[in-house]
Structures are given as structure tokens and as C-alpha cells.
Image: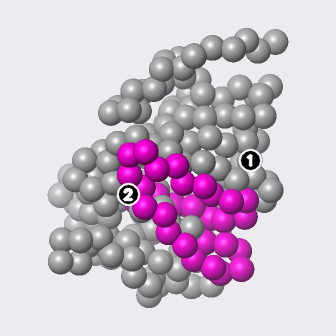
């Protein structure tokens, strides 16, 4: 049987107390998601294999709801900001919430029908991700981007489609500002 409890979330580090699991993604594990392959290779060659993001979970198999944090390091590959892999949920009826606590980001969203949207991520803004929309977060700030997510426990992550074809839009730096541009490598 599950019992209620309070979980302390550190808005600066994304640490959860208690948590059930966590993982990190290093830049080297994100091969193929950035537009500029040469910049990616150069980044890795120069020893730059830092943690791009960390995900910390509070997840109980017996509960319908799970939550956790994602903590994204600031950085760029070429002119493209650090981002998550991006995914659809396996269970298409499952949406999600992303509540930003620290930092600045852009949430890129894409429906299966090809609609594109973005939601600004900044402290106090809760982004609503409807069922059926692929989502990828992008850290466009100079500091860590920390957000809390809340999702159905068995929503499942379907990474294949986004990994293969990419998303229709990218977020790049232009004149020191983040800008959403079409993905010229988008391959449906
Ligand atoms: C989030 C994401 C997390 C990492 O918990 O899984 O931010 O992003 P990727 O999974 O795309 O690498 C979520 O959306 N869960 O459903
Ligand atoms: Zn998700």
C-alpha cells in the first residue's frame, strides 16, 4: 500500500527528497539531434562531454501519477542550444505538465498532424502538454533550466520517431537572442 508523503524539491538543483531514481544524459549520448554535426564532433573532441541534463523521478509503479525534475545545463552546439531528446508518449492519451522553477527555456511541441507550437519556459509558468504532442525542452538561458514534470506513470517514452526525422523547428542563437527557426534537416 502507498502512503502519502511530502517531497522536497530544490528549485535550484532539481534535487528531490526522497526520490526513486535518476539518470544523466551526456552530450556525447545525444549524437544526431543537433543540426551541426561538425560542431558536435568538435565539441566532443575538445573534451566537452559534460552532463547535458539530469532527470530525477518520484515514481511508484502502483500509482497512476508520477513526477520529477529535469535539470538542463546551459550550452550550445554551434548556434543551437542544449536540448532534450524529445519524444511522444507511447500511450497517446497521456499529456504532461512542465512547471519551470529556474532558468529560461523554450518548449517545442509538435502534433502528429504536423502542427507546431512553442511555450516559453520561465519561473512560474506551467506548460500544458496535451496528449498526442511530441515535446522537447531547450535551455536558452545562461543558467541551469530546472523544471518539474508531472505525468502518468505508464505514459511511456517513444523516442524513435523524433530521433529519426527530427522536429520541424529548432532553437538557435541569432544576435545573442534565442530564435525558433525551421529545421532544414527535417526528414519526414
Ligand atoms: C520528461 C523528459 C525529460 C528528458 O521527464 O523525459 O525532460 O527528456 P527526454 O526524455 O526527451 O530525453 C518527460 O517529458 N517525461 O515524459
Ligand atoms: Zn514526456
- At 75% from the left and 52% from the top, the residue drawn is 94
Q: Which residue is tagged 2?
A: 105
- At 40% from the left and 40% from the top, the residue drawn is 101
- At 73% from the left and 12% from the top, the residue drawn is 3
Q: Secondary structure at mark 1?
A: loop
Q: Which mark is residue 102?
A: none
Image quarter where the N terminus lies is top right
152 displayed left or right of 121: right
Q: Residue furthest front?
A: 124
Q: CA distance from mark 2 to mark 1?
A: 24 Å
- Magenta segment, prevailing SS (helix, strand or loop): strand
| Sequence-wise first label, 2 or 1 | 2
**The image quarter in which residue 134 lies:** bottom right
The front one of 148 and 77 is 148
The front one of 179 and 81 is 179
96 displayed left or right of 19: right
Image quarter where the C terminus lies is bottom right
**Which stretch appears magenta?**
110-138
Nearer to us of marks 2 and 1 is 2
Q: Which residue is tagged 1?
A: 155
- Please state the horizontal and vertical placement of residue 116, each as a whole percent of the image: 57, 77
Badge 1: few (under 14), some or many (20 or more) residues near its Cα, within 10 Å? many
Asked if 49 appears above or below 140 in the picture, the reply is above
Amino acid at each position: 500500500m502507498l502512503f502519502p508523503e511530502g517531497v522536497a524539491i530544490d528549485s535550484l538543483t532539481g534535487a528531490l527528497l526522497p526520490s526513486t531514481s535518476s539518470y544523466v544524459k551526456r552530450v556525447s549520448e545525444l549524437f544526431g539531434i543537433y543540426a551541426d554535426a561538425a560542431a558536435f564532433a568538435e565539441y566532443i573532441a575538445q573534451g566537452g562531454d559534460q552532463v547535458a541534463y539530469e532527470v530525477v523521478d518520484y515514481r511508484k509503479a502502483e500509482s497512476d501519477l508520477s513526477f520529477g525534475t529535469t535539470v538542463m545545463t546551459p550550452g550550445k552546439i554551434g548556434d543551437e542550444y542544449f536540448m532534450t531528446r524529445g519524444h511522444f508518449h507511447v500511450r497517446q492519451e497521456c499529456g504532461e505538465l512542465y512547471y519551470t522553477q529556474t532558468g529560461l527555456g523554450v518548449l517545442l511541441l509538435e502534433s502528429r498532424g504536423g502542427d507546431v507550437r512553442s511555450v516559453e519556459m520561465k519561473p512560474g509558468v506551467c506548460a500544458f502538454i496535451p496528449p498526442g504532442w511530441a515535446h522537447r525542452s531547450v535551455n536558452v538561458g545562461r543558467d541551469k533550466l530546472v523544471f518539474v514534470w508531472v505525468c502518468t506513470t505508464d505514459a511511456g517514452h517513444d523516442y524513435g520517431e523524433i530521433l529519426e526525422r527530427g522536429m520541424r523547428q529548432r532553437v538557435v542563437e541569432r544576435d545573442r537572442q534565442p530564435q525558433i527557426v525551421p529545421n532544414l534537416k527535417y526528414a519526414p
